[in-house]
Image: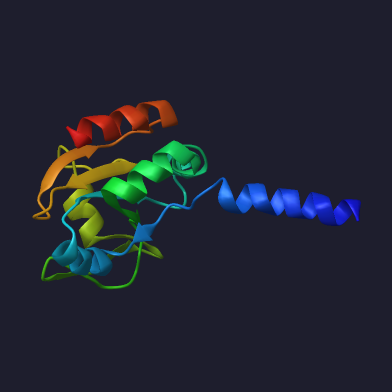
Amino acid sequence: MKKLILFIIFFGFTSTGFCQLKTRTFEEVDSLQHFQKRKIIVFIHTNWCQFCQRMKQTTFKNQEIIQKLNSDFYFIDFNAEEKRDITFNKQTFKYQPSGNNVGVHELALQLGTINKQIVYPVLCVLNEKKEIILQYNSYLSPKDFKLFLEKLKE
């Protein structure tokens, strides 16, 4: 009986107290913009980038950040080494291999290149017309990311 009560309490806290970050694809955002215009935040990362993984485990697990992203923006979690073709804004982007099992996606380069180079992680913010309005390439703690989102809302 005690185990059942503990299970119910634990399940209640985990299911009602926390919400999940809604991540979208580029194709979904194309469609969603027809119904509700929002700024788009693209988190460009790789699996091998330590700062990218740290942001995923800290910043994007913060409940306040999740709520703001879900309610005010479209959020795209984009691996720069994605191999599938992506159609976005009426254009198709492809993976560009640069060696043996190494390469980068054209769309990651398009959205994440700052001063002729791409440094991960990258946050790219697009306006409702899908134009780049801001690029930032560095780790952001939950505290700093909250400030980042507040400035975007202005």
Tell me if residue 122 comes above or below residue 95 in the rendering.
above
Measured as percent of width and height from the top left, residue 118 is found at: 25, 44
Tell me if residue 27 comes above or below residue 144 in the rendering.
below
- The residue that appears at 39% across and 56% down in the rendered structure is 22
In which quarter of the view is residue 33 placed? bottom left
Is residue 95 visible in the rendered image? The answer is no
- The residue that appears at 34% across and 46% down in the rendered structure is 69
Q: Nearer the viewer, residue 38 or 43?
A: 38
Q: Nearer the viewer, residue 152 or 8?
A: 8
The count of marks equals 0
Measured as percent of width and height from the top left, residue 140 is found at: 38, 32
Q: Nearer the viewer, residue 12 or 27?
A: 12
Q: How is the image coloured?
A: rainbow
Horizontally, residue 70 falls left or right of residue 89, namely right
- The residue that appears at 12% across and 55% down in the rendered structure is 130
Q: Nearer the viewer, residue 145 or 51?
A: 145
- The residue that appears at 91% across and 56% down in the rendered structure is 1
Q: Is the C terminus in the top left, top right, bottom left or bottom right quadrant?
A: top left
